[in-house]
Image: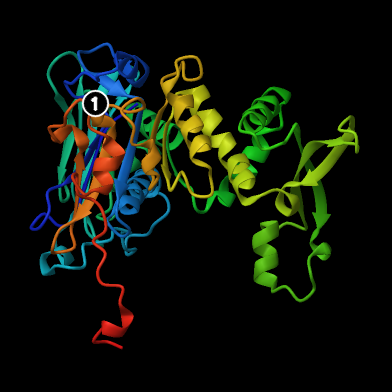
Amino acid sequence: MLVEFTVANFRSFQDAMTLSMVAANLVAKDKTVDTSNLIKTDSEISLLKTAVIYGANASGKSNLLKALLFMKSFMVNSSKESQSTDKIGVEPFKLGLYGETSPSHFELVFIMDGIRYRYGFEADRNRVSAEWLFYVPSSRETSVFSRKDNVIAVSKKFDAEGIDKRTRNNALYLSVCAQFNVPLAEKILAWVSDKLNVLSGLHDHHYRNYTAGSCDTDANRLRISSLIKALDTGISGITVERNTLGIDSLPSAMPEELKKLITRGSDSFTQVSVKTTHKKYGNDGSFVGKEEFDMDENESDGTQKLFALAGPLLNALNEGEVLLIDELDSRLHPLVTLAIIRLFSEVESNSKNAQLIFVTHDTNLLDKSLFRRDQIWFTEKNRYGATSLYSLAEFKIRNDASFGSDYIKGKYGAIPFIGSLDIKASPYV
């Protein structure tokens, strides 16, 4: 379960952006909101099942999720997919001079097997300048290892003798330890790889094959079909067809490099097609049979998105994962988005305590009957172009206040300031 994620690129003009899934010390007016949105842990803290992020366009919402996606990728791959001269894929803050030389800071606090861990690192394009891992075995936080440039101090309980000398400037020590089969490092990277997933709600077609693959078992196909059917798409069933085709079936004019990419260097490749079933009716309204549609050719963009996301959504619920989705509401009706959120807040559908963090512009969701104040977050840029991230829990709000209406009125910030739209009056025309 995700507890906190912190990222900072330029500390001179902004504090670190920290998204916390730890419940604040507050009580919702509607007690059922607390009941449905809180996860009790073995310690004194409670966690939140969902969190939503609002903000103007270009305010930094997507960058927060991209930073977490980079952190995950760098943790898992830095020791095995780079050479000593390769650049690190951090993006420094570009609107201030110090941002070009200051390292980027990343930190993740999470609970794994009932134990709380805090892992982070600082890096620029050339090297990792700091790295640390702490855990809480009982009541006090204890260091597992700490790194300052090439000097790494390691606890005796962390069985990683000599691995510090094998760690390159542009690789993470944790990643190298996992490569050399250090148990705790392997366990943490497996958790991050399997349990922490970032998705795009705009480029959702990337997850289509994942969902199609999930339909290989009758149980999963039924769950996916049931979800899509329940969201009023008119679909009564889904089938997935796989056909093995030879490389000769590709257009002769297609570049050879693209053919190799599609076939992954093989002489054949598998083509996946998704078919949907719809009920067909006669002129008198009676049921006369079923009609098969092709998902890509006959279904709406919204339905295609629902199918693509169905696999990751249901897998997160089934495995107790942490799922972050950018632009969740894109191409979806507000009631469909609401239904997806309720999948994570309802105890019956989320018995494994999965967590959903998502970015949206849908102010219909800013409802006190759905979210506690500590579940609602905002991003806003200051005069220097740096992003601040803050929670609605930081505001004093009347019990009868309307979250959505007050947000649009600008009471919480994080909205666009629209200038004059009189183009003729513009000095640039």
User: Considering depth in this image, is 176 or 263 the residue closer to the camera?
Assistant: 263
* Apparent side of residue 183 relative to residue 270 in the rendered image (left or right): left
* Apparent side of residue 203 relative to residue 281 in the rendered image (left or right): left
* Apparent side of residue 60 relative to residue 44 in the rendered image (left or right): right
Name the quadrant containing residue 42. Answer: top left
User: Which residue appears at 63% of the width and 28% of the height?
Assistant: 230
User: Which residue appears at 35% of the width and 18% of the height?
Assistant: 113
- Residue 223 lies, in percent from the top left, at 65, 25
Q: Quadrant of the C terminus?
A: bottom left
Q: Quadrant of the N terminus?
A: top left
Examine the rendering and report whether any part of residue 288 can be seen: yes
User: Considering depth in this image, is 355 or 331 the residue closer to the camera?
Assistant: 331
Q: Amino acid at mark 1?
A: Val
User: Considering depth in this image, is 198 or 107 the residue closer to the camera?
Assistant: 198
Name the quadrant containing residue 292. Answer: top right
- Residue 366 lies, in percent from the top left, at 33, 36
User: Which residue appears at 54% of the width and 29% of the height?
Assistant: 315
Q: Which residue is mark 1?
A: 22
- Residue 424 lies, in percent from the top left, at 31, 84
Name the quadrant containing residue 118. Answer: top left
Examine the rendering and report whether any part of residue 180 can be seen: no
